[in-house]
Structure formats: C-alpha cells, structure tokens
Image: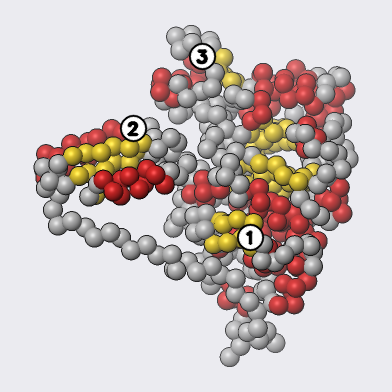
C-alpha cells in the first residue's frame, strides 16, 4: 500500500499543522538550482536540538514550505541571521512569550521574486512572503526541535509563528530604506531578522502633523502590557506609506522621525509602578538609563538605545495605519546581513 | 491516484540525542547541593527555601549557588562543568 506523503508529514511531531509539499529528489534538485551554493555547506546548527542547517537541509525545508527555487537565497540568508550568536535563537524557541523571528528584506532581489512590501504584505496572499517565513519555522520545528509543549513553551503561540516575512515598501517610502539607514548600499540585497511579538495595529486617519500622529504610535510602543516599557528589547514600528508621508511632508527625514518616536515613547514612573511587571528597584537597576525612583512624574522611555527601534515603511499606501511589534528581551538581538542572490 | 513512497524524509532524529540522566544518590546526607539561579525575579528566594529545607531534613555537607547572567541566555559551559564537578545533586530554576 503506497504511503500518502501528505499524511506522512502530518504525522510528524514537527508538523506546523499545515500540509507540506513532499520533498523529492527532483524538487530538491530544482530548489538547489535557485542558489549557487555547495549543498554540503553548513550555515549553522539549529538550537536546541542542534541538527545542522546545511544548504541541502535548508533547500528541503524550502521545498516543504512551498518555496520557489528563486526564494532559496533569501531563506539561506534569513537562516544565517537567526543562527548568529547575537540572535540567540534558543530564546525564541523556548520562550514563554509568543515571539518569532520577523524577517525583513531590502534590496532589488525582493522585487525580482515578488516578495510583497505593499498592500496586504503580512498576508495572506503572497507566495514568497508566506513560504520564506514558513521555511524558517519548519526548520525551527524540525532541525531545532522547537516542539510546542516539549521545548517550545510559548503559552499561546500565534499566527506570526507560522510565517512572518515582508519586503520593505521601498517604492512608496519617502525615505532611504531601513537597510540604508543601517549602513548598507541601496542596491545591496539585505535580510534582517528581528525577535518580535506579533503586530498591533495603530489606526490614525485624523492626525495630519507629526506631533499628533506620534501620540498614538508612541502610546502603543510604550503599552504597559508590551515587552518594552519595563525592560529593554528590540521593537518594530512599521509605518504605512501614508503615515510616513505625514512625517515626510513636514520635512522630517527617516532619522528625524526615528528620533521623535524614541523621544515620545515612554510612560511616567507613577503609571508603570501601579501595576504590570514592576519589579521595584531591582528591575529599574537593569535599565540602561537612570530614573529618579522617588519622582512619580519621571519619564521612563520604552526605547533605551535608539538602535533598538527598527523603523520600517510597508503596507498599502491607502491605509492610515501603522504597526507596532513589541520585543522580548535584550538576550536576543536583531541581525542584518547581505545575502547572495 | 496516490503517490508512491519515493519522497524524502528530512526529519531530524529527535531521539538520537537523548541524554541519560545521572545516577541518583540514595541519600542526601553529607552531599553537596548545587543551586542554579536563572536570574528570574524571586528565583533566588525559591532556591534558598529549597536549600534550607534540604539542609534541615537531610544534613547537606555544602550548598554551592551559581547564577546565570540572564535568564534567556544559556549558562556558559564552564559554569555547567563546575557544577558537574563540584556537586552531587543540583536544582536549576527554569522559566518564570
């Protein structure tokens, strides 16, 4: 009796719950053609199980995720990011929070493969977005052994843990790209992985000047239930092109906007002491900045180091909304790398 | 028409790395207890309470306490090796 490959993979402990494309020698060969790499090259080992992510293994998971061969360079690049020591992937594997690697792609190759950074980019609907992110997760599950209830202790999980990958909307952004702001050239193909929670929508169709628009965005950034106000971590803020234009029309550069959000995002000490995960002096001692603990009105910033804020332009231009993605801890940090397309 | 079984199985061997637990001592009397604090809030209080109870009940020889830099970072190899060398039993704080 022939084995049904779809049911075979559903029966695996590491299944993400959705059907996979069964890998065959032909599909693997076609996938490996998508990148000019030695299949035996080891990109890294996936914690905590530490099975090797060779180019061949990555290609197999890209097949299963439903990737086209021309997506493989991005998948390899994203794996290289999350397997760097500073990303500390074991944190997102084991965390009791719900974080996942958010994958942001800059540069011309994203357009070549149809990776969406515009309307609907967080899905569903775009093969590159859906499958590149999914390939990463399948490797975290299988090669890393990040199985819910076994090693993966996230109480909730979350839809962004299936896949979480977009291109920046470089065409409709009023500014140089996220990657350029980080020191890369405009024609370099760059992939960034950031450890983040899921996105929260900030809807504002009323504010037409930067100071007013910053209010709701900064408020969400410093949410008491979010991962940034009580402890330092990376944070993502994704401005729609329409919101980015509110700042740009007022003559503000990307840096100006970044600075404004960093300055505005925070709470009075009295508020954050009233509940949440206020840890007293011991918690405050971990902050990279000094706050007078006897001053109820002292300002506690949500962003301790400006580099912690990852400001991106994406989404549809007709959407007066932005996204805030809170962080987890400083023990896992964003990584950006060029990748060979 | 079902496909034949000529697909590949990229499953990592999740069983191959099974770790055999160390032998348990028959008694705690005169033994050295290790405490590994993951630095999560109040973990130290829980560990100290456990140590005090074990000291009182069983007469431990010594308690050795070590603390990770950060709860979300793995303990350095050297720290784990030190505990393995120095203690008979260990209690590690996880999660929190």
Residue A20: image location, x then y, percent: 65, 68
Residue A208 visible from this viewpoint: no
Tell me, yes or no, whether dots 3 and 2 are on the same chain. no
Question: Dot 1 falls on which chain?
Answer: A
Q: Earlier in the sequence, mark 1 or mark 3?
A: 1
Label 3 sits on residue: A291
Residue A82 position, x and y percent, is: 62, 48
Residue A64 position (above or below residue B2): above
Task: Kindly identify which chain the residue marked by label 2 belongs to.
Answer: B
Residue appearing at x 24%, y 46% in the figure: B87
SS class of the residue under badge 3?
A: loop
Q: Are marks 1 and 3 on the same chain?
A: yes
Q: Nearer the viewer, residue A219 or A183?
A: A183
Could you say where residue A157 lies in the image, as x and y percent from the top left? 54, 50
Residue matched to label 1: A42
Secondary structure of residue under mark 2: loop
Q: Are marks 3 and 2 in contact (CB under 8 Å)?
A: no
């Amino acid at each position: 009796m022939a084995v049904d490959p779809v049911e075979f993979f559903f029966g695996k402990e590491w299944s993400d719950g959705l059907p996979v494309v069964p890998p065959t020698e032909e599909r693997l060969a076609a996938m490996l053609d998508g990148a000019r790499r030695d299949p035996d090259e080891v990109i890294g080992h996936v914690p905590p199980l530490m099975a090797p992510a060779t180019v061949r293994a990555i290609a197999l998971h890209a097949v299963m995720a439903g990737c086209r061969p021309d997506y493989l360079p991005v998948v390899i690049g994203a794996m290289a990011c999350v397997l760097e020591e500073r990303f500390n992937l074991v944190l997102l594997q084991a965390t009791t929070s719900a974080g996942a690697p958010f994958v942001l792609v800059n540069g011309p190759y994203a357009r070549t493969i149809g990776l969406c950074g515009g309307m609907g980019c967080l899905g569903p609907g775009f093969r590159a977005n859906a499958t590149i992110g999914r390939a990463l997760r399948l490797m975290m599950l299988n090669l890393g052994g990040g199985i819910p209830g076994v090693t993966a202790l996230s109480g909730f999980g979350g839809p962004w843990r299936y896949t979480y990958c977009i291109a920046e909307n470089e065409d409709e952004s009023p500014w140089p790209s996220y990657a350029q702001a980080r020191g890369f050239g405009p024609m370099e193909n760059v992939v960034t992985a950031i450890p983040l929670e899921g996105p929260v929508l900030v809807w504002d169709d009323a504010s037409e000047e930067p100071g007013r628009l910053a209010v709701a965005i900064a408020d969400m950034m410093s949410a008491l239930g979010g991962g940034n106000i009580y402890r330092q971590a990376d944070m993502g803020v994704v401005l729609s092109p329409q919101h980015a234009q509110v700042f740009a029309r007022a003559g503000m550069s990307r840096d100006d906007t970044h600075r404004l959000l960093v300055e505005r995002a925070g709470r009075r000490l009295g508020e954050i002491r009233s509940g949440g995960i206020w840890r007293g002096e011991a918690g405050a001692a971990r902050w990279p900045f000094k706050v007078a603990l006897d001053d109820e009105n002292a300002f506690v910033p949500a962003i301790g180091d400006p580099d912690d804020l990852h400001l991106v332009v994406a989404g549809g231009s007709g959407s007066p909304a932005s996204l805030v993605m809170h962080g987890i801890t400083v023990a896992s940090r964003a990584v950006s790398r060029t990748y060979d397309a | 028409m079902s496909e034949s079984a000529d697909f590949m199985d990229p499953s990592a061997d999740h069983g191959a790395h099974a770790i055999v637990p160390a032998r348990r001592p028959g008694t705690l009397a005169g033994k050295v207890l290790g405490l590994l604090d993951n630095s999560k809030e109040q973990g130290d209080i829980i560990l100290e309470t456990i140590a005090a109870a074990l000291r009182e009940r069983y007469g431990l020889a010594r308690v050795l306490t070590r603390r990770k830099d950060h709860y979300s970072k793995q303990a350095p190899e050297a720290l784990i090796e030190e505990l393995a060398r120095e203690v008979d039993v260990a209690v590690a704080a996880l999660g929190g």
